[in-house]
Each structure stands twice: as C-alpha cells, then as structure tokens.
Image (tube, rainbow, N blue to C red):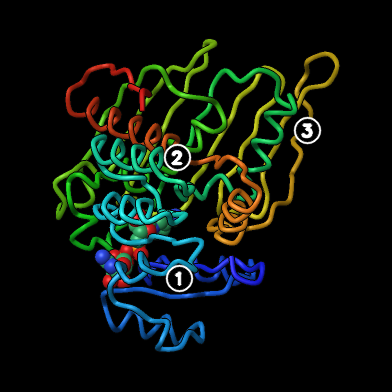
Amino acid sequence: MKDGKIRSAHIGMKFGMAHVEGAMSYGADIAAICDCDPENLKFAGERYGIGEEKRIADYRDILKDDSIDIVTVAVPDQQHREISCELLKAGKNVLCEKPLALTREDCVQIVKAQRESSAKFMVGQICRFTPAFEKAKELIDSGAIGEIYFAESEYAHDYMTFLESWRADPLRHGVVGGGCHAVDLLRWLVGDPKEVFAYGMHKLLPMVDYDDATIAIMKFDRDVAGKIFVSTGCKRDYTMRTLVYGTKGTIICDNTSPTMTLFTVDENGVTREPETIEVELNNHNAAKEFAVFADAIINGRPVMTDAVEGAKTVEVCRKIVESAETGKILVPDYNF
Ligand SMILES: NC(=O)c1ccc[n+]([C@@H]2O[C@H](COP(=O)([O-])OP(=O)(O)OC[C@H]3O[C@@H](n4cnc5c(N)ncnc54)[C@H](O)[C@@H]3O)[C@@H](O)[C@H]2O)c1
C-alpha cells in the first residue's frame, strides 16, 4: 500500500467496470485498467477519467508492478484459472468473478495457487452482498423463522441477446455460469447439499448445445430439502426469487425488488400478518464486495468466499448438470 491507500488494477472492461466503480467508491488509487479490446479499454478509460498511461492491453504487465495491492479479474470464465493463478503466483491479491472456473480441475488449480501464495483470493459471489439476501441471512441466523426445513432459489435471466461464443460453450452451462449465484446463495443460507437430483429442459435457446432450463432438488443435513431453478432463456425480466421456510416463519425475497416479506408466528404458533421489510435495491453491490476484500487484506481477516468456497459452489453446479444428463442422484465431493 502506498501512502495508506489501496492501489488496484482491473482486468476486463465490460462487467469489470463494476469493479472499477467499487474500487473508486472505496477510495482506492486506480493503478491500471486492462482489456485486450482497444475499444472497450478506451471506453472505460474515458468513462472513469483514467489516463492512457494507465490503460494496458496485456494483463502480464500487472504482474511486474509491485505497487499494486488488488487485481480484479472479469474476463470470460474459461480464463479465470490461468489469470488468477498467474496473479497469485506473483503475490497479487485477486478478486475474480464468479464462477470460480468451469471445471473441477481448474478449481483445484486455483485452490492450489491460493494455498501456495502469500496473497489472498476472493471469488465474486456478489449475492452475498445483496441487501435483501444479507437481511435474509441475518433473520435466519437470529432464529426469526426457527429451524429451516426447505429453501429454494432461482436464477431467471434471459441470455438471448448476449450469447457470446464463450457463453455458448457447453462447459459454460447456464447452471454453472449464472446458476452458480442461486447455488452459492443456498449454500450460504442453508449449508452444503449432500445429494442433488436434476431435470433439464431445452426449448428456448436452440443456438446452444446445453439445456436452457434446469430444476434441481437437493437434500441437506438435519432433514432440510432445497430446490434450484435456473432458466437462461426465460421470457421475463431478470430476478433471483428466493424462499426460505422455517418452523416459525418464512422469508420471501429477491434481488430486484425494494421490499421483502417476512412471516412469523405468535406465541400460539399462529401465522401473523406478513411484515414488509424495505431493502436497498442493489443486486451488484460491487462497492461492498471490494470493501470487504480490502478489509480482509488490511486487517488479515479470512475471506468469506475464498477459492475453496468458490470451488464447492462449482462442484454443486457441475453435479446438477451431470444429474440432469444421467438421471442419477449425485453426491457432491467437497474435498478441495
Ligand atoms: N457477478 C455478476 O453478476 C456478473 C455479471 C456479468 C458477468 N460476470 C462475470 O464477469 C466475467 C466477464 O463477463 P462479461 O459479461 O464482462 O464478459 P464480456 O465478454 O462482455 O467482456 C469481457 C471483457 O474482457 C476482455 N478480455 C477477454 N480476455 C481478456 C484478456 N485475456 N485480457 C484482457 N481483457 C480480456 C474482453 O475484451 C471484454 O472487454 C465473467 O466471468 C462473467 O461470468 C459476473
């Protein structure tokens, strides 16, 4: 850190611009932005007033700069492993976009690089910073809805207009690429599923070679069941509707509404009128994500979504895809 200020560099200037904004709102010194597409680099540079001397085309230039504390990575998922591993090897703290990677092998490599590095690693499971989901977590942990017996989350997002070649790659199945948000959310709110079973449908995106809708049911410890629904061709607006049912109440929330609903019971166990809770609308809370990572680095705290956590989420996603293909109940392997 120079003059007590975090210096950051940012790779990938499309969704990655959210990381630039997150770093700016934190007050970081932007050392570099990087994109191999000159148009995207120029656009981001002009948008954020970042001079040409800080605009770079090759991320390897960042490896040599010892003054950079945090590097954010927002490039196609297929490149997460290579870039994250190189950065960790060079001692850079890395905030890499979700999903951690597309295959178990790549996840294992990133976990290994994290273990061997002096630096910290965070995967951007941004739903853990969405105000409604943070509130749901707080309510669950406080016992407001009693013991959970069922939880479900969905990822409904129409990809029809942005199916770049890397998103059309069968390895980048919708359950892994976008559905990882819903899977990670359930893992955070409820725990690690012990078994998964899924069905896939393919009616909406004929241009891809993978199912565009998947429904998975899962079993957790303590007699808790869960459900994930992913649709990447849905004819509706984007949302992640999430319900958590407990023995003393129910939470209904999403990441696209300014309110969420809480049901609780009275002293006789009778359901009260629902409570409407106002929440800030912020489904890409990159500012908090960056601040939490910077805080972990400065204060030596553990990172909530480190590479192992990211790998476990990808593992559940891959087992869901495999179950839909084979018709088998599968057991995720969390040994990373
Ligand atoms: N957290 C979220 O909700 C969220 C939302 C969108 C995307 N993402 C993730 O962010 C990542 C990027 O997605 P996107 O929508 O911005 O993709 P995109 O294809 O729209 O943009 C990727 C950018 O990275 C650049 N790029 C590609 N390879 C590069 C390299 N080796 N070096 C430098 N620049 C490179 C491209 O030129 C492009 O500008 C993906 O991992 C995606 O899954 C996350």
CB atoms at circles 2 and 3 under 8 Å apart?
no
Residue 22 in picture, x, y percent from top left: 56, 65
- Asked which secondary structure carries label 1, the reply is helix
* In the image, residue 279 above or below residue 35: above
Identity, as a three-letter code, of the amino acid under mark 1: Met
The quadrant in which the N terminus is found is bottom right
Q: Is residue 55 above or below residue 280?
A: below
Q: Amino acid at mark 2?
A: Ala
Q: Nearer the viewer, residue 254 or 25?
A: 25
Residue 134: x and y, percent?
Answer: 64, 43
Residue 44 appears in which quarter of the rendering? bottom left
For discs 1 and 3, the disc positioned in front in the rendered view: 1
Q: Which residue is the site of mark 2?
A: 182
Q: Is residue 56 left or right of residue 24?
A: left
Residue closest to the eye, 186 or 156: 186
Q: Position of residue 43 (x, y in %)?
A: 39, 84
Q: Is residue 163 left or right of residue 221?
A: left
Instruction: Tell us which disc is closer to us: 1 or 2.
Output: 1
Q: Amino acid at mark 3?
A: Glu
Q: Which residue is mark 1?
A: 17
Compute the Cα span from label 1 to label 3.
Answer: 42 Å
Residue drawn at the location 23% of the way across and 36% of the way down: 105
Task: State the separation of the CA atoms marked 2 and 3.
Answer: 28 Å
Residue at the image position 35 percent from the left and 30 percent from the top: 316
Against 7, residue 273 (above or below) is above
Quickly name the residue at label 3. 273
Task: Please state which of residues 69 and 187 is positioned toward the viewer in this rendering.
Answer: 69
